[in-house]
Amino acid sequence: MGTQRNGFSKRETFILSVDVGTTSIRCHVYDKSASIRGSCSAKVSLLYPQPGWVEIDPEDLWKGFVTVVKGAVQDSGLQMCQMESLGISTQRATFITWDRNTGKPFHNFITWQDLRAAELVRSWNRSCTMKTVHGVMKMLHFLTRQKRFLAASLVVFTTQHVSLRLVWALNNIPQLRQAVEDDSCYFGTIDTWLLYKLTKGLVHATDYSNASATAIFDSYQMCWSGFLCSLLSIPLSILPSVQNTRYSFTLNCSGISRVLSSLCLTKQIMLFFFSLIFSHKFGTCDPSIFGVPIPVMSVMADQQAAMFGECCFDIGDVKITMGTGTFMNINTGNKPHTSIAGLYPLVGWKIGADVVYLAEGNAAGTGAAIKWAQDLELFSDVKETGAIATSVEDSDGVYFVPSFSGLQAPLNDPKACASFMGLKPSTTKRHLVRAILESIAFRNKQLFEIMLRETRIPITKIRADGGVCTNNFIMQLTADLLGRKIERPSHFDMSCLGAAFVAGLGTGYWRNQEELKKLLTTDQQFLPRRSKADWDKDGRYRGVLQSWERALQRSMHWYSQP
């Protein structure tokens, strides 16, 4: 386990990382080679108190967080004092408000899936105020020719944004309104709540990656949007301070941490030393929680963390996460991308003075469509779907539109319906399964092409992760349609790994990003079976794609309201 030096046993140290997702909380213990030494997971219980409402009990989430950290360390066979630092990755745009004096929440977490603000969204998007804002932005674009004003003239609110869900809470929860008046209210996304709990109320903060995903943050000015908050009557006083994704040290903290860990000092002495050494913005876990004061060295939003975990550090690097939905991100460097087609400009991470921006397109209904098909008993085991799809030559003219939650970029239609089109007596379950898997690859192609067209950034590499990327049929078809090599990592929990990488860089556990790239392992590379030009010439999938796009058009504007 260690070596004897100067009378002390030098213990090996490790990095803890936790990812709080929509359906589960996972914690891994990573060693120097980025291998997982111990793991633990717990289910996130979603609550549905009313139709369209989706909540999480904050105390249950907190207990689950503590449980998985302790469980992962126990599973590793290591001691808690060997944990050098903690990194945290969380789902985005799920929020809570609480009393800053007592720590008592005013309501459960209101998740990104929650639809209680749907009427507010419709009302605001149709309002004279929004029409005026759009008009002013168009005028500013005409006068300045700055693309950001043109993009702002097309912006509309959605229920996935924190903004109007927070407005709903401010309007409908009396205790919250009173706390705002008394200046005793805190707002936070999941990361902010966890930091508050881990530090026993000492820290009320978030990082730039999480803040940029709330839709009340100005990624151009790198601060909360005073304009939006004023427009929506959201008090700036309740918002957390926004800090770097990782704190940068001038001391050799890695060496100091290892010395302190090797001594296994008492909680009080350890707390004293760490309070001196790790006095950074995210604070240190109170020793009463895990027995030792573990410094929180990174806080990240899940998709940005996955981007970092995939080592997409260079401009033009692309990450495709295929889970419940698909998230495609491209590294745009030190400038935010301004989109008019529905790509979202995000802060990837801010480390020291360096800011990395991402452009993101998403498609809902990826893993959700596969799960739906399994529930309909089109197949029994998800692992069979690739073989089922290849057992037929094509989908027999059947096309699936995966829009259970509307269509996102580039069509941006929340009223679209999911549908099968082209059904005939010869259609079998195998054709339906193939059509579903093809639709996921088709949406990947759509997102990729709008990303290429809008950003005009040469693509340097493409990495894929998420549960759906284990499907070789989808991966190969995506590589064929994009005409690009796609790499699949050896393990798919990239959000956890990304938060661990950032935390480890903060303490000197890993030296730099080049070292991280060498640690990344690839399970399989998917090469296009022929060039994109050849696919277009041969017309096999060109005709299929055209028919699928017609199916998309016929599914649009189906519902009278989202």
Image (spheres, helix red, strand yellow):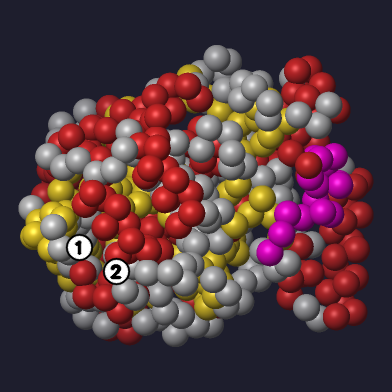
Q: Is residue 190 left or right of residue 296?
A: right
Q: Residues within 10 Å of mark 2 (few under 14, many from 20)?
A: some
Relative height, residue 20 to residue 358 (above, below): above
Q: Amino acid at mark 2?
A: Trp
Q: Residues within 10 Å of mark 1 (few under 14, many from 20)?
A: some
Q: Are marks 2 and 1 in contact (CB under 8 Å)?
A: yes
Q: Give the residue drawn at x 82%, y 21%.
A: 178
Relative height, residue 195 to residue 547 (above, below): above
Residue position marked by numbered label 1 in the rendering: 32
Place of residue 237 in the rendered image (x, y in percent of width and height, measured from the top left): 78, 42
Residue position marked by numbered label 2 in the rendering: 510
Label of residue 139 in the image: none
Magenta region: 222-236
Residue 361 visible in the shown view? no
Provide the secondary structure element on which disc 2 rests. Answer: loop
Q: Give the residue drawn at x 61%, y 76%.
A: 335
Q: Is residue 203 left or right of residue 287?
A: right
* Placement of the C terminus among the 4 image quadrants: top right
Q: Give the residue drawn at x 56%, y 28%.
A: 109
